[in-house]
Image (tube, helix red, strand yellow):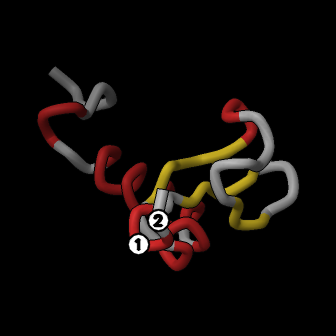
């Protein structure tokens, strides 16, 4: 795989960005297309969770 096709993961154990040869997949988030996106993995998770928490189609806590 060339450098332009490389993927990156965020390791939840070491809090570092890794390439394909890193920790086991169960311990990391990704893949992400860039090192910068992988570095923001926890922020991306938080943003997605916040969006899902406020999505009226998926709001399980809404009174019926």
Task: State whether residue 59 is above or below residue 28.
Answer: above
Name which residue lies at 47% across and 65% down.
2
Name which residue lies at 22% across and 26% down.
63
Distance between the alpha carbons at the discs numbered 2 and 1: 5 Å
In the rendered image, which quarter is residue 64 located in? Answer: top left
* Residue 50 locus on image (x, y percent): 39, 56
Name which residue lies at 15% across and 41% down.
56
Report the number of discs. Answer: 2
Q: Which of 43 and 54 is in front in this view?
A: 43
Which residue is farthest bottom?
36
Q: Is residue 39 left or right of residue 16?
A: left
* Number of residues whose C-alpha sits closer than 10 Å to that of mark 1, classed few (under 14), some (14–19) or many (20 or more): few
* Number of residues whose C-alpha sits closer than 10 Å to that of mark 2, classed few (under 14), some (14–19) or many (20 or more): few
Tell me the element at label 1. Answer: helix
Which residue is farthest right?
14
Q: Nearer the viewer, residue 7 or 41?
A: 7
Task: State whether residue 18 is above or below residue 23.
Answer: below
Q: Nearer the viewer, residue 3 or 11?
A: 3
* Residue 29 locus on image (x, y percent): 59, 47
Q: Nearer the viewer, residue 42 or 51?
A: 42
Q: Are marks 2 and 1 in contact (CB under 8 Å)?
A: yes
* Residue holding disc 1: 4
* Residue 27 locus on image (x, y percent): 75, 38
Name which residue lies at 76% across and 35% down.
24
Which residue is farthest front?
2
Tell me the element at label 2. Answer: loop
* Residue holding disc 2: 2
In the rendered image, which quarter is residue 61 located in? Answer: top left
Task: State whether residue 3 is above or below residue 23.
Answer: below
Q: Is residue 2 left or right of residue 13?
A: left
* Residue 44 locus on image (x, y percent): 46, 63
């Amino acid at each position: 795989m060339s450098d332009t096709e490389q993927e990156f993961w965020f390791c939840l154990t070491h809090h570092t960005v890794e390439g394909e040869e890193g920790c086991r997949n169960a311990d990391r988030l990704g893949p992400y297309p860039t090192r910068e996106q992988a570095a923001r993995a926890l922020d991306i998770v938080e943003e997605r969770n916040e969006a899902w928490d406020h999505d009226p189609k998926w709001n399980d806590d809404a009174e019926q």
